[in-house]
Image (tube, grey):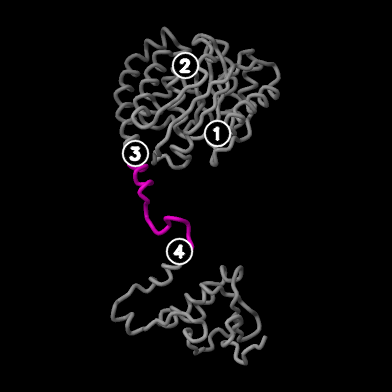
């Protein structure tokens, strides 16, 4: 193939010195647009696009002599549209209009819109959900506060009255927005039988859906949530167990507290993954819950939550998508080896999640 004598005439190679710097056709078009309108120098255009150009560029420009002025006609050599400076100035076009049109086309779908119609509807539903749960929490918290002294005197460990109010609060919050389907309710132990409940963790909605079961199991929560007005105070009165995640001493105290409650006839609830799954896949289980069950000789009740992660994804608590939730309660599992229990329970939950994927 014959190469043009002047480097600027070759659409595959532009050379003016020693060290080469590759620019993509999109980057050079950006430079051409800027050059014609007089907003950006040649050197600034090259340096600004150096990162992306080095990876997938096909045009090469030398870096040392980028200050040398070049004159060529882009329409003749590259068959690119010719920009009329006077026409652009008279029409008062936006200086980045041409570049933005190409970037939008190469981005993700709906990237040119600030908020799609679907996301807008989910945002509105999220605001309504927060409003409903906040209003319900205020009124029910007052009732919980009034009965709290009697609960401490008559039912200090299970606190059934508080959990009954929590069930009403959760039902009022989720019923207008989503439908919950229960499977395997016959596998639940009797309310007075202590057990260790474990479940996968996908969303902030998990607590709401689990409270609708109406069982008095003690959750484990981060200490910072207890500082939230109303919600944190209600959790304190319900006897939720505080935990500092990065503090090994706090973790040990939490497990001891769980074993004490189980021996007193109270059930406890664990999310063995430790945190919400970001992609919906089941994470690694920690053995704390299974150690408590093995040492106290109580059954473990596996629960699979399906759908909460899609309705309210983790990190996006301000939106509420359409959908339904399934709560699958599996048969209780007993044993004395925490590792065997952990493996068996995780497999049980993972099998149901894989069937849904």
Q: Determine the secondary structure under disc 3.
A: helix
Q: Residue at x 29, y 29 (%)?
A: 135
Q: Position of residue 35 (x, y in %)?
A: 45, 82
The answer to if 220 sits in the magenta stretch is no
- Evaluate if marks 2 and 3 touch, with contact meaning CB atoms under 8 Å apart: no
Q: Which residue is mark 2?
A: 216
Q: Secondary structure at mark 2?
A: loop
**Residue of label 3:** 125
Marks 1 and 2, the one that precedes in the sequence: 2
Distance from disc 1 to disc 2, alpha carbons, whole Å, reads 29 Å
- Of the two numbered discs 1 and 3 on the same chain, state the one appearing first in sequence: 3
* Callout in the foreground (1, 3): 1
Residue 356's mark? Answer: 1
Q: Which residues are magenta?
A: 104-126
- SS at mark 1 in the image: helix
The x, y position of residue 243, in whole percent, is: 53, 29
Residue tagged 4? 105
Classify residue 175 as left or right of residue 103. Answer: left
- Which residue ends up furthest to the top in the rendered image? 154
Q: Is residue 309 above or below residue 30?
A: above
Residue at 55% from the left image edge and 41% from the top image edge: 279
Q: Earlier in the sequence, mark 4 or mark 2?
A: 4
Residue 164 appears at what percent x and percent y?
39, 16
Q: Earlier in the sequence, mark 4 or mark 1?
A: 4
Are there few (<14), some (14-19), or many (20+) residues within 10 Å of tag 3?
Answer: some
């Amino acid at each position: 193939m014959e190469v043009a004598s002047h480097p600027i005439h070759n659409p595959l190679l532009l050379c003016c010195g020693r060290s080469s710097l590759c620019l993509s056709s999109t980057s050079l078009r950006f430079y051409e647009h800027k050059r014609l309108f007089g907003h950006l120098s040649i050197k600034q255009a090259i340096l600004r696009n150096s990162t992306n150009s080095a990876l997938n560029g096909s045009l090469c420009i030398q870096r040392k002599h980028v200050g040398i002025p070049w004159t060529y006609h882009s329409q003749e050599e590259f068959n690119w549209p010719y920009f009329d400076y006077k026409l652009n100035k008279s029409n008062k076009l936006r200086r980045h209009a041409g570049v933005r049109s190409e970037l939008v086309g190469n981005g993700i779908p709906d990237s040119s819109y600030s908020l799609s119609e679907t996301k807008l509807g989910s945002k509105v539903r999220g605001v309504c959900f927060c409003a409903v749960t906040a209003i319900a929490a205020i009124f029910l918290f007052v009732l919980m506060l009034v009965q709290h002294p009697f609960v401490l005197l008559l039912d200090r460990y299970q606190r059934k009255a508080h959990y009954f109010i929590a069930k009403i609060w959760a039902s009022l919050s989720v019923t207008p927005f989503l439908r919950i389907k229960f499977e395997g309710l016959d596998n639940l132990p009797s309310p007075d039988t202590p057990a260790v409940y474990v479940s996968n963790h996908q969303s902030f909605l998990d607590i709401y859906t689990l409270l609708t079961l109406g069982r008095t199991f003690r959750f484990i929560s981060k200490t910072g949530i207890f500082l939230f007005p109303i919600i944190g105070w209600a959790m304190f009165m319900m006897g939720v167990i505080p935990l500092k995640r990065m503090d090994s001493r706090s973790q040990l105290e939490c497990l001891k507290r769980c074993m004490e409650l189980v021996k007193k006839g109270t059930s406890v609830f664990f999310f063995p993954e430790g945190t919400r799954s970001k992609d919906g896949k089941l994470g690694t289980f920690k053995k704390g819950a299974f150690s408590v069950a093995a040492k106290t000789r109580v059954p473990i009740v596996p629960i699979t939550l399906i759908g909460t992660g899609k309705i309210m994804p983790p990190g996006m608590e301000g939106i509420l998508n359409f959908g339904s939730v399934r709560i699958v309660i599996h048969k209780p599992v007993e044993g004395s080896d925490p590792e065997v229990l952990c493996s068996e329970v995780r497999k049980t939950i993972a099998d149901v999640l894989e069937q849904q994927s």
